[in-house]
Image: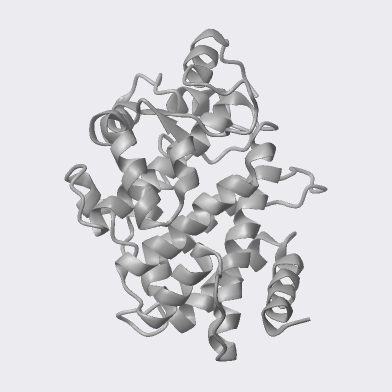
């Protein structure tokens, strides 16, 4: 077994040990950012602030719960999280080993870039390339989620890509300047707003109305403005640019004619996948 394989095996073992511990997943990333977060204030999370806030939301929602828990987690969310953790942990182990290896997966290379040159741009490329890769490996699991959750994970993706666009210098809208900085508290604030990030898993009837932009109240209106006015009109361009920033060509398969398409692994997927099912299927309480 060569040195890289040894490090891969070690990374897999670390992730396996925290697989059924949502707090263990959080702790793994917290400790990473204590080393590599570049905080302005000692002891803070620095560039890891947004990521850790998002993990806290996943924990609160229950998607990372063990599958044998009283309220089981989501195979899809758990798989995306585990793959993300593996890529970042492998990069950390490689960096701390002092070794260099050719032909590493793009997300691992981006995490190494971030560790060596921590800033907003290197962080987004490491983070988002890992998320996109996680979506790819968990594609088949997405079909086990209901249609509303499938659509919601597209929303989660295009919002984080939109935030990256502002750091990359692409002007998709003024709100990105506020929400783009991973050091800030925007993610923490948004994940506390039910309209943006529901706290129930599976989604409740109220959550579904927000996800499908059918909630006729103030927070629903704010969400509509955020998504429909600032992000949705630019999805094709956004995903095209994101494929370049993150060296992740697969993300181009997640969009067509400004319509999200993920998951992509079954033949039924087309540009009408969500439009048809979300408008014809009666919303029911889950």
- Is residue 283 visible in the rendered image? The answer is yes
Left or right side of 283 for 119? left
- Is residue 189 visible in the rendered image? The answer is no
Residue 272, given in percent of the width and then of the height, sits at 48, 16
Which residue is at 46% across, 43% downward?
A: 251
Colour scheme employed for the rendering of this structure: one colour
- Looking at the figure, which quarter contains the C terminus? top right
The part of the image, by quadrant, that contains residue 36 is bottom left
Considering every residue shown, the one lying at the far right of the view is 68
86 over 191 or under it: above or below? below
Considering every residue shown, the one lying at the far front of the view is 102
17 over 166 or under it: above or below? below
Left or right side of 98 for 2? right
Q: How many marks?
A: 0
Which residue is at 57% across, 34% downward?
A: 263
Considering every residue shown, the one lying at the far bottom of the view is 98
Which residue is at 48% across, 71% downward?
A: 109
Q: As rendered, which of 42 and 231 lies closer to the eye?
A: 231
Residue 90, given in percent of the width and then of the height, sits at 61, 74
18 over 71 or under it: above or below? below
- Looking at the figure, which quarter contains the N terminus? bottom right
Q: As rendered, which of 228 and 190 lies closer to the eye?
A: 228
Residue 224, given in percent of the width and then of the height, sits at 31, 28
The part of the image, by quadrant, that contains residue 284 is top right
């Amino acid at each position: 077994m060569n040195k890289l394989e040894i490090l891969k095996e070690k990374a897999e073992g670390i992730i396996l040990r925290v697989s059924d511990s949502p707090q263990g997943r959080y702790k793994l990333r917290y400790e990473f950012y204590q080393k590599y977060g570049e905080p302005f204030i000692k002891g803070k999370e620095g560039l890891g602030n947004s990521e850790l806030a998002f993990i806290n939301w996943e924990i609160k929602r229950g998607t990372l719960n063990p599958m044998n828990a009283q309220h089981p987690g989501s195979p899809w969310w758990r798989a995306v999280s585990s793959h993300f953790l593996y890529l970042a942990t492998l990069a950390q182990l490689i960096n701390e080993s002092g070794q260099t290896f050719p032909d590493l997966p793009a997300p691992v290379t981006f995490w190494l870039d971030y560790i060596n040159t921590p800033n907003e741009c290197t962080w987004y490329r490491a983070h988002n390339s890992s998320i996109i890769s996680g979506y790819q490996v968990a594609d088949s699991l997405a079909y086990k989620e209901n249609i509303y959750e499938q659509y919601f994970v597209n929303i989660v993706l295009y919002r984080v890509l939109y935030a990256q666009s502002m750091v990359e210098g692409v002007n998709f809208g003024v709100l990105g300047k506020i929400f783009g900085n991973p050091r800030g508290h925007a993610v923490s604030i948004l994940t506390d707003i039910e309209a943006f990030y529901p706290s129930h898993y599976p989604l409740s009837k109220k959550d579904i109305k927000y996800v499908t932009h059918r909630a006729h109240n103030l927070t629903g209106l704010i969400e509509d403005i955020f998504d429909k006015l600032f992000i949705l009109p630019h999805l094709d361009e956004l995903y095209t640019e994101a494929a370049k920033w993150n060296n992740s060509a697969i993300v181009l398969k997640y969009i067509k004619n400004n319509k999200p398409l993920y998951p992509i692994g079954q033949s039924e997927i087309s540009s009408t996948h969500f439009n048809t099912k979300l408008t014809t299927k009666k919303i029911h309480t889950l």
